[in-house]
Image: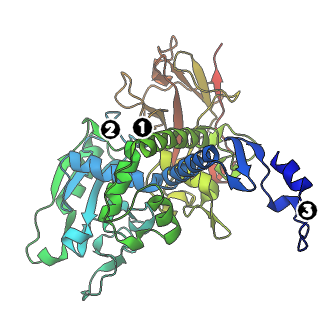
Amino acid sequence: MATQARAQSPQPKMTTPIPESIKARESVETSIGTLEYFDGVPKPNTVETVYDYLDTSRAVNVYLNSIPALSVNALREGQAAMGADACHKICIWDNLMDSKSILLTGNTSTMYAVGFLDLVKDGPTVVDLPQGMLGILDDMAFQYMVDLGVAGPDKGKGGKYLVLPPGYKGDVPEGYFVVPSKTSGVWVFMRGYLDKSMPIQEAVPAASKNIRSTLKVYPLSTADAPPATEFINVSGKDMHVILPNDYSAFEKLHGLMQTEPESYLGPEARGMMAAIGIEKGKPFAPDARMKKILTDAAAIGNGAARAISYFPRDPGNLTYKDGDAWVTAFADKDTSFTRNGAYRLEPRVLFHFGYICVSPAMAMTVAGKGSDYSMGMLDSEGKVLDGSKTYRLRIPPNPPAKDFWAITMYDTQTRSQLQTDQQFPTKGSQDEGIKTNADGSMDIYFSPKAPAGQEGNWLQTIPGKSWFIALRIYGPEQPWIDQTWRPGKIELVK
């Protein structure tokens, strides 16, 4: 009717043609419903629809972009729940990490020790590192700060690192590896390798002793009489350090924002958070409408993160470019998640939703040194792995691992070690009793019960649950690097 009325009205003298591309039609069908206008002005139902969509889309964006921060915040909360609530208190897996620890893709083969710094509370803080360690400092955006130990400036010889608070202007004493921080919180990750020349029952306590007897963490202000470093053995304990994927994620994010300087995030990210009610110095108090939207957005964000994790579409996340059977955590071995100066959003989500520890050294593959790994997420037909069925993975002859190789199973819900009757859900070259085929290859079986005669080559699965695996190569040799040696695919045994 309005169009007809305008058509019958006299043509104003100053009329010029208006391109259809800049006008709003009276009714437009979209993916969020029918949008209706009176001469370009949204009608009340359209205003409501559009604002609901904007708030939801911004909240989904905030959730996905905040997965790194939510993950490192979960580590801080989980470690504090174990008693590591001060810089000089360190969680250590004295008996290695088993599946009781709900921690993203942890392994069962090396000894972990982790802590947290609070630079607002303590000021400049010292990490006095033992010899023979490998570690990382990551900030509260889960961004890389510095390597510790073998890959760091101490070159594995040990030394004192001095971590400075954001914007620190005070004196800096000599004799330290100085590390400025952009955030108030800093995650301290350390890994002690086991001495391969020793039996495992001797190598594990030796690695623990090296850390316990020499690692020190304390505020610089207490350097003359530092508090004794306290070690908390978390092996076999129920430890939860996984980011939430429901409405509580936004509550956690708001709490984190209160502990960090405003420079922690850029204006675009802060504006996106402010648009959904998350601001530093202000309460987080969404009304019923906004809480419903945030709950929906968390569910959508969780779905997106899981789709990206198990069915990645960025080719950089494929270990082998001619197939999707194996996935790599760092797309194209890039720990900055950028391409041509722009963030690669989905690879960043994939990594931080399923993995921890950000360091260029984690993605750098050097023949005979360090480690490298790849994940088997689906079976050979691209189907989700079913814990009620039997699968087989063939490891070809001569796995190119100077030190050792290992396969560890993970829970698709938590991305942590799969909890079964097996304390350590891992099989590898350090295990005794693995059968070898006539050609030197090995078959690893995954099923609820061990196939007859394959007990030494078997990892248990749980009916009703899915799973995935990580193949770790310690001391990767050239055939692994140039991909002339590859693992098989996970095949369903029919």
Q: How crowded is mark 3: few (under 14 residues within 10 Å), some or many (20 or more)?
A: few
| Disc nearer the start of the sequence (2/3) | 3
Residue 101 badge: 2
* Element under disc 2: strand
**Residue 24 visible somewhere in the drawing:** yes
Q: Are marks 2 and 1 in contact (CB under 8 Å)?
A: yes
| Disc nearer the start of the sequence (1/3) | 3
Q: As shown in the figure, which amino acid type bears the numbered disc 1? A: Ser
Residue 426: % across, % down: 44, 33
Classify 200 as above or below 112.
Answer: above
Classify 121 as above or below 70.
Answer: below
Residue 138: % across, % down: 39, 63
| Disc nearer the start of the sequence (2/1) | 2
Q: Nearer the viewer, mark 1 or mark 3?
A: 3
Q: Which residue is drawn at 71% across and 46% down?
A: 36
User: Which quarter of the figure has residue 163?
Assistant: bottom left
User: Residue 321 versus residue 74: which sits nearer the camera?
Assistant: 74
Q: Residue at x 64, y 40 (%)?
A: 326
Instruction: Calculate the distance from the C-alpha at mark 1 to the C-alpha at mark 3.
Output: 72 Å
Q: Which residue is drawn at 36% across and 56% down?
A: 254
* Element under disc 1: loop
Left or right, 46 with respect to 168, comes to: right
Outermost left residue: 225
Residue 248: % across, % down: 37, 43
Q: As shown in the figure, which amino acid type bears the numbered disc 3? A: Pro
Instruction: Calculate the distance from the C-alpha at mark 2 to the C-alpha at mark 3.
Output: 77 Å
Q: Which residue is drawn at 10% across and 66% down?
A: 227
Q: Do the residues labelled 1 and 3 touch (CB within 8 Å)?
A: no
Residue bearing mark 3 = 10
Q: As shown in the figure, which amino acid type bears the numbered disc 2? A: Ser
Residue 416 badge: 1
Left or right, 326 with respect to 415, comes to: right
